[in-house]
Amino acid sequence: MRRLLGLGSQRLRSPLTKHMLVVAKLRSQQQQKQQQRWSSSAGPLPVPGQDETHGPPATSLGIRLRNYQEDCIQSILTSFDQGHKRVGVSLATGSGKTVIFTHLIDRVKPLSPTATQTLILAHRKELVEQAARHCANVYPDKTIEVEMAKLSASGTADITVASIQSLTSKDRIAKFDPNRFKLVLVDEAHHIVAPGYLRVLGHLGLATKQPTSPHLVGVSATFSRFDGLALGAAIDEIVYHKDYVDMIGEKWLSDAVFTTVDSKANLSKVGRLGKGGGGDFDTAALSRAVNTDEINDITVRAWVAKASGRKSTLVFCVDLAHVASLTQRFRHYGVDARFVTGGTHTRERSACLDAFKAGEFPVLLNCGVFTEGTDIPNIDCVLLARPTRSRNLLVQMIGRGMRLHPGKENCHVIDMVSSLEAGVVTTPTLFGLDPAELLDAASVNTMQEIRDHTMSDETVKKLAQQPVDVSQTAGRAYKVTFTEYDSVFDLVADSSGEKHIRAISKFAWVQVAQNRYVLDSASGTFLRLEKVEDDETSGAPRFKAWEVRSLPPGLSKSPYAAPRQLLVAESFIDAVHGCDKYAGEKFYFGTIYLGTRWRQGPATEGQLKFLNKFRTFPEEPYGPGDLTGGKAADMIAKFKHGARGRFANLLADQKRRHKASLAVDQEHERKLREIVSVGPLPS
């Protein structure tokens, strides 16, 4: 068997092939980065076998897994021991997903004396290279090959890292014998039900759960599909989940502060992709709505007002035209803003990223380049100039700024999406489709590129370098409205979502998502009320309520019984009154009544202890007198039924509240698919 990795090993053979040089280079780069991190870290290295959190011992190469990383691996191995084959791991961006699944490889038992190989699948070049680097350092004595573009693996290596696009082209998958594999690992596994992945899984005997097939582990920060495809077609159950709130609370991710900005954009006429218009915004239409002089000016001025002191801001734009115009606007205000697009040459992109990481310029703009598989830990501000209806995309964008970095106190997320209210846009788009608007600015070819959204990097550069025409915006006093949250706890403590329902009800309902409310009893049983799309009424929205009963510990894997539907109502008021009648008869009145005495008094020691588990430095812990019993109970209810497992959805809830005029007719079904929890996935 060829040894393609073995730098410094007696097994290394000469001369090196192109494949060997590529993988050896990836290992060398990783070793250099590791050495730089060690030499630049403050204080001595931890004693081998023990870290500051008394976590698991270091590996043979001195790599110390975090406590939750070891817990995750144990959850996977336990699931395999119980006979499961296709499992998923849900971890927040920045949690070290690649570290986990590379360290898992040697701990999965071979299925037979010959079934010892591992295949790692990814859909981006950066992810393939990242996985290869990790494997090269963790397993110096194993053969590691890459199947990507012109690099062709033998099919017999101990570990093969493959690009899914390359593996499915020209029948390159045929050389991989399914009987020789013990483990298949899929990075960014929310893509796993795409046709290419399903074809590879079918070849490896993983189309369905089979005793003789390899084990499958899919890892993702966003285990949901916006297009409605069921992940259960490829993954049977989620065995481990750790979200942003947990990661921030345990100080494995950077803290974050949030600012929402009313940008005046009108999205009411922007089309939606997918069957029935249930998908994300149509890119071309969205660009025309967002990429205007006024909105770009508000966007840059919001950044200047709130984040000009930040060292490294990553900006997400809609498309190439938006990148060009927003870069142009930043430069007009004297900000050194640069950009990277999918068309940027690899060498130029690397140089730009290196300069950004070194702090040589403060603002980097992109569209669709840095949503997945990018590690830029110095990012201390994320500017969301790209509206989206996709929770996955939102999480990926915010996640770019959540990694820890020396000297980084937190990440400031400035959201131009959350409060986009309906309004008439009178200013024409900076790069519209009317040639008369562009005759002095660009050639006919440039206009065609803009119209087709296929601009070259050279065109983006040309447009970004042009002076800003301020004749349309000069002298205007745009009102920029901010809603700020110092932490996720401010989001949880925000009671504005309860004002409407508590004007109707005398009970302590809390809002846990858009159009979703929960009334929690002391016994753990709760009522859930939400607005839904009902096929029986030809798509007309209705209100439904369920009772979810708590189960005794040990009776079931789930702490709750299956929801039991209580009622269906045509109006919100009728639904609330019906739920209140039931709760008044079945629940202990003193636990749910808003006017009860304990809600007005101070929070109990138990309530404060629960909430303080999740507060992060430099926040001070809640103390006696800081919260009333009722306020603490409301916050705990939100953690139990929304915030802890759905941090990104909580942010989305804040955003949607400012867009009341936009009809979100298909939110319920989509949101159900987006909830990540440990347990089986529907097929």
Image (spheres, grey):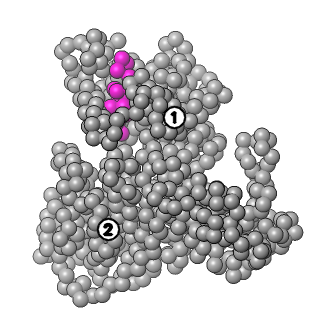
Judge whether 527 appears above or below 332 on screen.
above
- Quarter of the figure that contains the N terminus: top left
Q: Which mark is residue 307?
A: 2
Q: How far across and down, in percent of the image, does residue 679 sit? A: 64, 42
Quick one: 442 or 95, which is closer to the camera? 95
Q: What type of secondary structure mainly makes up the magenta span?
A: helix
* Secondary structure state at the residue bearing disc 2: helix
Reading the image, the residue beneath label 1 is 55
Q: How far across and down, in percent of the image, does residue 414 sit? A: 38, 67
Q: Earlier in the sequence, mark 1 or mark 2?
A: 1
Mark 1 vs mark 2, CA separation in Å: 36 Å
Report if residue 77 is visible in the image: yes
Residue at 69 percent across and 57 percent down: it is 606
390 vs 587, left or right, is left
Quick one: 199 or 317, which is closer to the camera? 317
The three-letter code of the residue at mark 2 reads Ala
Quick one: 642 or 18, which is closer to the camera? 642
Q: Residue 312 is drawn in which quadrant? A: bottom left
Q: Which residue occupies the extreme right position in the image?
A: 585
Residue at 47 percent across and 38 percent down: it is 52
Q: Residue 270 is drawn in which quadrant? A: bottom left
Report if residue 282 is visible in the image: no
Q: How far across and down, in percent of the image, does residue 316 sit? A: 33, 61
Q: Which mark is residue 612?
A: none
Decide whether residue 139 is among the magenta residues: yes
- Quarter of the figure that contains the C terminus: top right
Q: How far across and down, in percent of the image, does residue 56 sit? A: 51, 31
Quick one: 503 or 54, which is closer to the camera? 54
Q: Magenta residues?
A: 125-142
